[in-house]
């Protein structure tokens, strides 16, 4: 990062066509991590894994938390995929989260140099968090609000959520880029991760066919190492263990050259998620703080 905050975002972000292959790691914030922890772990994402971005997951409602995220990201040299989390407990708290986040994006001078995109999520169509027509209104309002900051707006959603939602075409038309959930473990055709490419390719091709040449990221993207209530397979052949978690990311890593050529500037993928302390079974790190497997995917090819 520069010694002082630039005056403009002109030529600040790399072209989307350079953002293919591995781009970063999802990071759950329900624990409302301290600034010290954020700085430490964002630096780890940047330095150990060469991640460009941290994709936020979950919500922390501590006043000014996103200011800490911005400071940590600036310190580490990473961008952020920000998230307005709907959740399940309070049907209206997302409005407070929206207003607080938009306020910080305007008031913090570093925010527009850190925030690559604003997401509504997670899976608002699948969960029917809002009527699709209302969701489109919210997306367009956020785009207008952030137009002076040049921060794009999207939703974080799986193909099935779009496919099963009447009105989802209007949502796809409204978003600036596509944050696609890719979780092949839950397919009815799932077996082992090393054989999951046809599942991934089917959903990916659906997104490409609908995305109107918009940039696509695999945002919530991974394979669990354990099952538990809420993380259960829909195929009796699906295998959840550390080896399969590793094999899934190895599979994506082997497709670097292919991802580079996908319309819209190629496909960049995130690893979901940073630690098993954040979401059991999906972490690159176990609950003991030790990496579960070697992870050093290609960031270009």
Image (tube, rainbow, N blue to C red):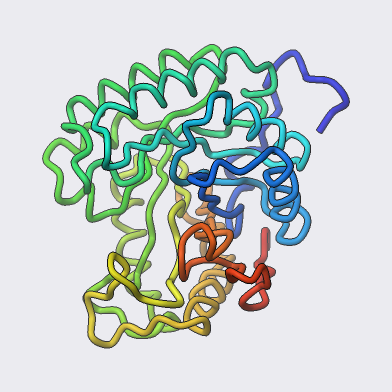
- The picture places residue 225, in percent across and down from the top left corner, at 46, 77
Residue 191 to residue 25: above or below: below
Residue drawn where x is 40% and y is 75% of the image: 197
In the displayed structure, does residue 51 sit left or right of residue 255? right
Residue 75 coordinates in the image, percent (x, y):
78, 37
Q: Nearer the viewer, residue 132 or 31?
A: 31
In the image, 116 versus 210, the foreground residue is: 116
Q: Is residue 31 above or below residue 221?
A: above
Q: Quadrant of the C terminus?
A: bottom right
Q: Quadrant of residue 14?
A: top right
- Furthest-right residue in view? 3
Toward the left, the furthest residue is 166
Q: Give percent across and percent down for residue 256.
A: 58, 66
Relative to residue 11, is residue 97 drawn left or right?
Answer: left
Residue located at (62% from left, 23% from top) = 112
Place of residue 141 in the rendered image (x, y in percent of width and height, measured from the top left): 35, 16
Please, which residue is most extreme toward the bottom here?
Answer: 237
Q: Nearer the viewer, residue 52 or 210?
A: 52
* Residue in the foreground of this view, choosing between 189 and 236: 236
**Residue 269 left/right relative to 141:** right
- 237 over 245 or under it: above or below: below
Specify the quadrant that holds the N terminus. Answer: top right
Task: Please tell me which residue is depicted at 42% across the width and 80% down the height of the picture.
Answer: 193
């Amino acid at each position: 990062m520069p010694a002082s905050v630039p005056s403009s975002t002109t030529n600040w972000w790399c072209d989307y066509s350079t953002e293919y292959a591995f781009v970063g790691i999802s990071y759950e914030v329900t624990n409302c991590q301290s600034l010290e922890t954020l700085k430490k772990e964002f630096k780890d994402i940047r330095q150990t894994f060469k991640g460009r971005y941290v994709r936020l997951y979950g919500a922390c409602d501590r006043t000014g938390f996103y200011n800490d995220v911005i400071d940590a990201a600036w310190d580490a040299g990473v961008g952020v995929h920000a998230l307005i989390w709907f959740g399940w407990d309070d049907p209206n708290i997302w409005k407070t989260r929206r207003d607080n986040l938009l306020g910080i994006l305007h008031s913090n001078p570093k925010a527009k140099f850190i925030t690559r995109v604003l997401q509504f999520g997670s899976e608002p169509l699948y969960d029917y968090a809002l009527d699709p027509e209302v969701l489109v209104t919210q997306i367009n309002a956020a785009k207008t609000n952030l137009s002076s900051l040049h921060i794009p707006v999207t939703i974080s959603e799986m193909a099935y959520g779009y496919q099963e939602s009447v009105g989802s075409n209007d949502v796809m038309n409204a978003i600036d880029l596509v944050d696609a959930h890719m979780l092949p473990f839950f397919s009815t055709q799932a077996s082992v991760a090393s054989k999951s490419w046809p599942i991934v390719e089917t959903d990916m091709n659906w997104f490409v066919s609908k995305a109107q040449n918009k940039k696509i990221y695999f945002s919530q993207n991974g394979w669990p190492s354990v099952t538990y209530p809420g993380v259960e397979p829909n195929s009796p052949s699906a295998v959840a263990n550390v080896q399969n978690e590793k094999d899934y990311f190895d599979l994506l890593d082997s497709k670097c050259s292919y991802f580079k050529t996908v319309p819209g500037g190629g496909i960049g993928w995130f690893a979901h998620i940073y630690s098993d302390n954040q979401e059991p079974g999906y972490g690159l790190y176990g609950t003991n703080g030790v990496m579960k497997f070697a992870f050093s995917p290609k960031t270009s090819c």
